[in-house]
Image (cartoon, coloured by chain):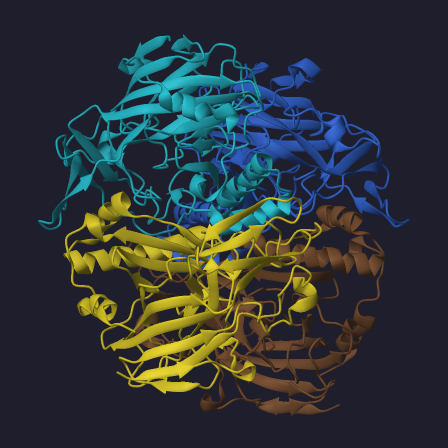
Chain colours: A brown, B blue, C cyan, D yellow
Amino acid sequence: MDIVEFSPETEQLTWTFGGAAPVRRVRPGSLLRLWTEDAFSGRLRSTEDLASASLNMPFVNPQTGPFYVEGAEPGDTLALHFVELTPARTWGASATIPFFGGLTSTDKTATLQDPLPERTWIYEVDTEKQTVGFQAQGSDFEVALPINTMLGTVGVAPAAFEVRSSLVPDYFGGNMDTPEMKAGTTCYLRVNVEGALFSVGDGHYRQGEGESCGTAVEGAMNVVMLVDLIKTPGPAWPRLETDDYLAVVGSARPLEDAWRAGQVDMVGWLSELYGLDKLDAYQLLSQVSEVPLANVVDANYSVVTKVPKRLLPNAEVYGGIHAQLRGIKS
Amino acid sequence: MDIVEFSPETEQLTWTFGGAAPVRRVRPGSLLRLWTEDAFSGRLRSTEDLASASLNMPFVNPQTGPFYVEGAEPGDTLALHFVELTPARTWGASATIPFFGGLTSTDKTATLQDPLPERTWIYEVDTEKQTVGFQAQGSDFEVALPINTMLGTVGVAPAAFEVRSSLVPDYFGGNMDTPEMKAGTTCYLRVNVEGALFSVGDGHYRQGEGESCGTAVEGAMNVVMLVDLIKTPGPAWPRLETDDYLAVVGSARPLEDAWRAGQVDMVGWLSELYGLDKLDAYQLLSQVSEVPLANVVDANYSVVTKVPKRLLPNAEVYGGIHAQLRGIKS
Amino acid sequence: MDIVEFSPETEQLTWTFGGAAPVRRVRPGSLLRLWTEDAFSGRLRSTEDLASASLNMPFVNPQTGPFYVEGAEPGDTLALHFVELTPARTWGASATIPFFGGLTSTDKTATLQDPLPERTWIYEVDTEKQTVGFQAQGSDFEVALPINTMLGTVGVAPAAFEVRSSLVPDYFGGNMDTPEMKAGTTCYLRVNVEGALFSVGDGHYRQGEGESCGTAVEGAMNVVMLVDLIKTPGPAWPRLETDDYLAVVGSARPLEDAWRAGQVDMVGWLSELYGLDKLDAYQLLSQVSEVPLANVVDANYSVVTKVPKRLLPNAEVYGGIHAQLRGIKS
Amino acid sequence: MDIVEFSPETEQLTWTFGGAAPVRRVRPGSLLRLWTEDAFSGRLRSTEDLASASLNMPFVNPQTGPFYVEGAEPGDTLALHFVELTPARTWGASATIPFFGGLTSTDKTATLQDPLPERTWIYEVDTEKQTVGFQAQGSDFEVALPINTMLGTVGVAPAAFEVRSSLVPDYFGGNMDTPEMKAGTTCYLRVNVEGALFSVGDGHYRQGEGESCGTAVEGAMNVVMLVDLIKTPGPAWPRLETDDYLAVVGSARPLEDAWRAGQVDMVGWLSELYGLDKLDAYQLLSQVSEVPLANVVDANYSVVTKVPKRLLPNAEVYGGIHAQLRGIKS
């Protein structure tokens, strides 16, 4: 197995899906050991570092990549399996940012109100207890929360000659911000350009569903992942597989459209896997789906449609590649 | 303890929140043993019974109630605790209905396309295995799914002289269609009119999050519940408490507004419970919330914001009434 | 011709569509001379009267009515023609109201931000120049704006046993807040209950499209109108006819659904009037419609789809009733 | 005055905002005589040419440009004034395209319904009468409609390293599809990259507000326009000026966000022009704005907020450049 190690220098960070030259070429079947910078580009290091003074737009949400996958052609299915996601710093950061987030007006949901105050929270990592520490700033409340590492951003280059900011989630993946993107998950993405040009970033030590304030417990991450390529047609929207679930992530605005897009793709997926017609698959989905929000704060909102494997007969999903990838030890 | 038994005759069913005379007066602390008709008013009994021919609008989603709660005054908090929800028939039904549901155009998300075909599915209840049986109609696929009983509709009379169809979820509860409304849950609702005038209905033997096709495994239900009254200000949106979670259900369109409403209420609730200021509560919620969809098909869409109790210090919630009600045996 | 004069006493004002006893019975063909109170119930009379201190919820947007139309049965078409709308006071008022309006967060588009400040503006009516005077409060800017009287609220009782606040626009009309509801307009509404039970209110001396801040130049109004009844099926959404336009008003959230609903109804209307199939009517509408916003602030948003008569051949609309009503002198 | 003539060869057409090399460098003050291909890339020439067979995605909505404006730096204001828009063919075309348009489900507003049928309409141009001819296909109805030429697409390269499809409207302009983009209009855009890199395309011989079916009367266009540069900060959203109106075009989803964005920008603009504080400008806008929809079909929806100059005192807008440009004869 090829093993690729890559820890970008600051000047190697990228800020888009598409439009950047690959940092490495990798063969299907490779194992990658990567380091990702946090979404704040490491600039929020104390509660004194407020977003509007410390961040340097548009240099946020840096990506590690893109990686050129040998043999990947438009229409193929790229499989990215996450083996380990480990905090690469002893602290994570979260912040309110003026006119950004779910419970404030924004540049698009625009109002005439003043922004919420800015505040930055630093969460100390307790490696032994596997927790991050929340400390209130307006009172002396504190609580240790379990670490649940995930990647906010996993994506490939878009189609139609587009280049999108790494802040955007869409059909090409990107900034979906779903806690389902964790160790043990395989992510299937349709390849849009030669080489797929995928990248990863935006590590979260922990995130609630919806990512209400717009930022999770953001932290640099050590990422171990496997890359594979399937020469069958890729999905319309990013699909996820874990030992327990099949899932589709739709991203759009308004939020119901993100849901609709993922649901329609899941109807198609269930139809294929179980030989159901469209109406039967719709009915079955109606009774078995679990639908946690991913984000309601990004350029598109993201919703996850999950189907629990335990409720359904075994099915051959993408040739059983998830189980194979799960069996590979890093 | 007062015990009230009530199983409505057909002509006693009600179709609205507000606007109907109470069927019983109950004292706080009472235990109710009720029977609820299914959302189809029992008219879909075989796969031959298609919705448009069999249903008689607006006589759908019948309510058992309303109940007048002695001493309940506008502004109070009504606590409804569900002790047992048991299927009252040996089968449940689900159906596609023309221009109703999440993956079709509707009267409001209107398009010029033809409706999806109508189809009715009958799910046989296996009491021993505690399953309902899904049978595909376009193929011979079948699968038994675990029974997870819940009530789609729990609500009080609205404010501002309004009378709303039992199909509507809003601040007064109503047709929220969340799987969280199950045995073991306490639902807190603000009282809007004297006597509160709550009713329940729309039993589901099982429902996926989002209720994609617009109907769950609909079935008549035997409901055992406790009614209590708290003379402190009721919540802006329906709140739920289980042994494991605090939750708020927001209902609105578009879907992000349902989410925003519930989230803002939860920020307020966390602030009260833990003495947090608004920004700290917002931050904490951002890292701990679980947000499953309830419905994306009704007159308003509903989203649940849940906070796991295990992540936070113990807190006194409504005077500890949930634990008390849990302790009462039916 | 029957002539009905009615100027409600304060205790005769009504606050809902549906749910109130009729104030008068009128025969089709009657002419009504009415007085309507302003949406603030006349409580904002100087710039010192701020909304949150002066308004008494839910006693806002009072209606004059309802009127029982003899012979009106569910399914019929009610035709309401406005002959004259004349300011009944020498001043109008407008105001910002906390968490109400289009450029602020609200109870549903909820955020954690502070509300905008409250302010009340008084517009003096200049009867000779037919203007209302805007006076800035943060500077000495002032400008006289032409009076364009209209009614914000025209509606019938809803179906399905519902009673809706007079703040709501929907398929039954209601608080649509469109400047198209002016003298010379005929409004067609589907009758939902015996007698139709229509009411009018919410006079505006002037309003911009969208009613951005949530309130127009609100003023008591003298209304002269004609009432007629057509025993053919009423429209799904309120339709308007003027000498120059056919129009449909859709009301829903999100705003695109308000648009879709009205557009689909207009496609059907054009199909009927000109014998077009659905696709041809869709195409024609795509090239001829004018689509001004009505409101983006109420419980539902409202959008008007207009088709200019000058672009299309003459057509017989509701038996030519608009021209007849236009010909009647008050 | 520099005069630049440019009629792109097929291989010179561009398909994005940003990401393409400039076809010409132009100096501020230049007059451009351009030819633009239609949005179908000229491939729909008869009613037999249906979209899915004839169009070659993503090669639609071709742009003429981009043009590099000498001296344009990020933050500047680019002024584009349209002098003449003249049909460059004797026919225009419109079409329904599967799962594209306002009254059908789409890839994002996804449903399980079948698409609407495809149909293509050809509109013959009558140069003398200045009309285009609509011919129904399901009946023998026909009508001649006045030509109202406009450009659907006018935009600059986006910021943040992005490249966007020419189908997208956003803060950088692009595919706004507003009938206000006609001869006599000056469009102000913020410059995001050196040289601005603007392009134009998507000529419409006529379009209804909203562009319901997703396509206007699409036609190749001869464009005469003036380019100028203002070294003051450019607007957040595209602004338009005509002899009669000031306008802002907001683009977003859902539609209310497109409206909010444009309205907030207009509040700021009125504040600047008339020395009003935010609340006074909000109030004034509420009573004077005209708000026609532009499109409800593109990747973002677009809404125009217009303020009639006749209602307000004269104001100095961008140094009076509109009047200057209007005075220049081509």
In the picture provided, is D115 more to the left or to the right than A100? right
Q: Position of residue B255 (x, y in %)?
A: 53, 48
Residue D162 in view here:
no
Observer-nearest residue: C1 or B299? C1
Rendering quarter of residue B86: top right
Q: Position of residue D115 (x, y in %)?
A: 68, 53
Q: Is residue D26 above or below residue B225?
A: below
Q: Quadrant of the C terminus of chain A?
A: bottom right
Q: Is residue C291 above or below residue A35?
A: above
Observer-nearest residue: B61 or D60? D60
Identify the residue at the far left of this view. C140
Observer-nearest residue: A110 or D304? D304
Q: Position of residue B204 (x, y in %)?
A: 71, 36
- Residue in view at x 53 percent, y 14 percent: C194
Identify the residue at the far front of this view. D128
Residue C230 in view here:
yes
In the picture provided, is D185 more to the left or to the right than D24? left
Q: Is residue D325 above or below residue D6?
A: above
Q: Quadrant of the N terminus of chain A?
A: bottom right
Q: Position of residue C15 (x, y in %)?
A: 37, 22
Identify the residue at the far right of this view. B140
In the picture provided, is D14 more to the left or to the right than A226? left
Count of labels shown?
A: 0
Q: Is residue A3 above or below residue A54?
A: below
